[in-house]
Amino acid sequence: MPTCLIDPSIERKSVKGFAFPLGVYPVEPMTPIAGYVAEFEQADNAEEMDEWEAWPDQYVFDIVIPSDRIEPFWHQIFAMIPGRVFPIIDYIGHDAHREIDPYMAYEPIGKEKIIDALRQYRPFFFEDGMVGFGAVSENPFFYVFIDEHKIMTIRVEASFKSRVEKLLAAFDLESCEEPAGADSASHEHRSILVTAPERPDLLTGDEILERMRDTWRLVLNVDPEANVDDEGNDLGITPWRCLTRYATDQTPDDKYAEVFLTAECIRQAEELAQQSITESLDYQGEWLDVVIINADRITVEQLKEALTNDKKSKPFNAKTLESSKMLTIRFILPE
């Protein structure tokens, strides 16, 4: 069964008895403070927002908890949530103009699928500094999320407030003015997973994310028609690297290819990548299934390197970014 393993060479950082996650830690002097801050937030105006985005009156708890206690706390709080939930993942991916890739499901799944995944890939979810995860239920409203700093946020209706407070007290977490975790100072994120050629069952963070996208039915939650950076600047046509997975009725085992192209937005990039793979394979059998694993914007330097390494592609020139088009395909051979 696929799994993941912590790199044994990575040491945990602790400050004044507070253990930080292996994957995120402060790089300047700071005093960690375990505890929580709670506040009440009024309901969103449903008339001004999409029905999906409108949240009810809620109590919000932001919680800093040592790494050795966050997993048992998660299991206790997740037991309160109803049986069907919408999973969420934030991932520090490879896009050149976006720090976080936000994924969410638009269809609920049984919470046992989340429990199973957390058990199978525990180091990734609870220790890795590249990922945050959580879930939300609609009726009753209940939101719980552990971000990439391993700081927990809980949003609940008033009926759950006392239960959450009792659980916090059971873990000796007190209300304080300003809890302080790794994100309260200059800090670094890192992946803590190790892989080895002789252990094909050990997965990377990217590979686990791919499986979660399939199992949890996650969708990248960005505007598919826009091409902006984190500050909202319109980028126009940019270079992209699209990782694709494909299979046919004759070769049902998944194969992979990466497509380098230029496009105005992620929707156009994905459509170009899918079309390029289909035309390149020119498959005449019963079915060909092409899935876009991710579509990441890359820098001009990264594109130049990709084109230089491909003898069949045209070199980068001043006109490369003038229009949307496929530039080159690299079929990835299994190791």
Image: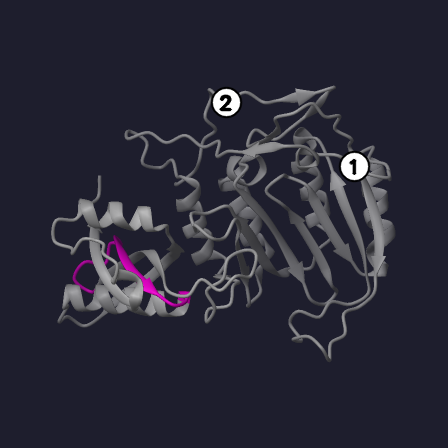
| Location of residue 260 with respect to 223 vertically, above or below | above
- Farthest-out residue, bottom: 47
Quadrant position of the C terminus in the picture: top left
Q: Where is residue 59 in the image (x, y as percent from the top left)?
A: 82, 56
Q: Classify the position of the N terminus by image quarter.
A: top left
Residue 208 lies in what quarter of the image? top left
Q: What stretch is highlighted in magenta?
A: 249-266
Question: Is there CB contact under 8 Å for labels 1 and 2?
Answer: no
Q: Residue at position x 75%, y 42% from top?
A: 63
Disc 2 packing (10 Å; few <14; some 14–19; many ≥20):
few
Left or right of residue 133, residue 177 in this image? right
Gap between marks 1 and 2, in whole Å?
Answer: 26 Å
Residue drawn at point x = 74 percent, y = 28 percent: 32
Above or below, 279 relative to 327? below
- Pointer 2: what residue? 10
Give coordinates of residue 113: x percent, y percent: 54, 53
Q: From the image, tell me which residue sits under label 1.
A: 179
Does the rendering let one see residue 165? yes
Say whether residue 332 is visible. Answer: no
Question: Left of 228 or right of it: where is 153?
Answer: right
Residue 130 x %, y %: 52, 41
* Residue sitting nearer the eye, 314 or 220: 314
Location of residue 71 in the rendering, given as x and y in whole percent from the top left corner: 65, 37
> SS of the residue at dot 1?
loop
Task: Locate residue 251: give its quadrant.
Answer: bottom left
Q: Residue at x 37, y 31 (%)?
A: 195
Of circles 1 and 2, the one toward us is 1
The amino acid on which the numbered mark 2 sits, given as a three-letter code, is Ile
The image quadrant that residue 135 belongs to is bottom right
